[in-house]
Amino acid sequence: MKALNAMSVGGRTFLPLVEGGKGVAATNHASAGAWARTGGIGTVSAVNADSYDADGHVIPQIYTARTREGRHEELVAYAIRGAVEQVRRAFDVASDELRAGRGALNINVLWEMGGAQRVLEGVLEQTRGLLHGVTCGAGMPYKLSEIAARHGVHYYPIISSGRAFRALWKRAYSKAAEWLGAVVYEDPWLAGGHNGLSNAEDPKQPQDPYPRVKELRAVMREGGLPDNVPIVMAGGVWYLREWENWIDNPDLGAVMFQFGTRPLLTRESPIPDIWKAKLTGLDEGDILLHKFSPTGFYSSAVRNPFLRSLEGRSERQIAFSTEAAGDHQFTLDVGVGRKTYYVTRDDLNRAREWNGAGFDTALKTPDNTLVFVTAADAKIIRKDQADCMGCLSHCAFSAWKDHGSFSTGYLADPRSFCIQKTLQNIAHGADPDGELMFAGHSAHHFKTDPFYSNGFVPTVKQLVDRIQTGD
């Protein structure tokens, strides 16, 4: 295994090992601070991060405003307060290394989260001198470079293709090139969480990341960026020995490696023990690349009962017409009360079967279809939609938008779910089988990697030391 050479960005020196930032309390001060203390880049999630009361207990994020706009303001306030507290605590954990110029702390934000710019500005204003950079993806964050430069921190944009970086560079980033810390290539077929698959790419046909990263380096060179501006390979990285040919490779330039899934199973990881236990039982193929997220992006998560229920919901779906036309000549007589919808004969028969199986309530989608769910599930869906607190800039599930009219203008989509609710639930002790459980496609290694034999859970330092051996 080749030795990993330390890298230097903005006067800081660190190992080319990055902790992936996992949103909504799955990466906090304890894990990020410990990672930075080892000499790598620790990443605090600034996505609705936890804050604490005087006794050190997590403050539940409870929303009391009667309107969505009011609840959104509460959410932004929670987000800023929590992220600031997490950054300060993480800095304290790694203060000796950080003050000596070794290791680094970043925050991770999602550009498509509700109030993203306000949250980012608020956090950076209150954490001056503590942060090295901002890692940001989920969308096209054109204003990221401007905000980072104004606050004197580096920016680490997350992209999934050279084409995406070219657009960002030409429109904005070239004006603040000196603050570009690294470019994070997040593989859309391998990474956990939300993925940047474009409409031109097939989710069922993974592409080799090497030529895609080589193309990204060519785009960076085209823009005049030197090869010592690192590319961070994110997604699918488990054993570094499998990526040895990427290290000191003249085609790729400086390369760093990001680990998102492996740090979940450490002693410092804040996720509940019940979630950690689930990770060790995963098999290859248990991670599903799906498009149920209310963001509209593809994302990768464990195909647990929560995701299977969403798959079933979409499978129990039929098209309808409000007038008899074409093959839609049959009046739907289940699930719709007194409303009149016309469907095909085959779909009428399917709807009657679903109704007999207990899926007796039909909900309209924005695509002029009906999905059949139980009455209990329909009640939960409607309540979650009504309780929306605006955690996304655009939400398909609730039809919320964080600006203008505060509405996307589309019908709320019952095929999706409240992502804020489920991610808060799983991070704070709920049964992972009933929640969205993000993970990368290499998570099955927890079960087969001898490092985790006999239920061993490493510290962050033990994990980082192990990674450097190639294993």
Image (tube, rainbow, N blue to C red):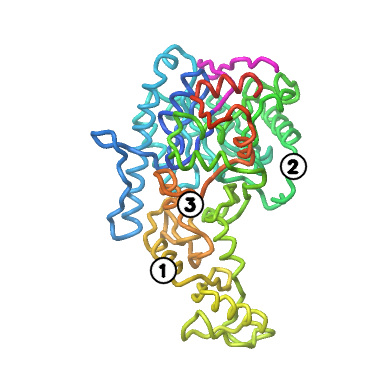
* Quadrant, the C terminus: top right
Cα gap from disc 2 to disc 3, whole angstroms: 29 Å
Looking at marks 3 and 1 on the same chain, the residue that comes earlier in the sequence is marked by 1
Relative to 327, residue 237 above or below:
above
Q: How many marks?
A: 3
Name the residue located 54 percent from the left edge and 86 percent from the top edge.
Answer: 333
Check the image and name the residue furthest to the top.
100
Please tell me how crowded label 2 is: few (under 14), some (14-19), or many (20+) other residues with Cα within 10 Å. Answer: some
Q: Nearer the viewer, residue 140 or 278?
A: 278
**SS class, disc 2:** loop
The residue pinned by badge 1 equals 379
**SS class, disc 1:** helix
Cα gap from disc 1 to disc 2, whole angstroms: 41 Å
Range of the magenta residues?
1-18
Q: Quadrant of residue 206?
A: top right
Q: Which mark is residue 207?
A: 2
Q: Position of residue 28 (x, y in %)?
A: 42, 33
User: Which mark is in front, 1 or 2?
Assistant: 1
Relative to 48, residue 15 above or below:
above
Q: Which mark is residue 284?
A: none
The residue pinned by badge 3 equals 435
User: Which mark is in front, 2 or 3?
Assistant: 3
Q: Nearer the viewer, residue 305 or 238?
A: 305
Q: What residue type is disc 1 on?
A: Lys
Q: Is residue 7 magenta?
A: yes
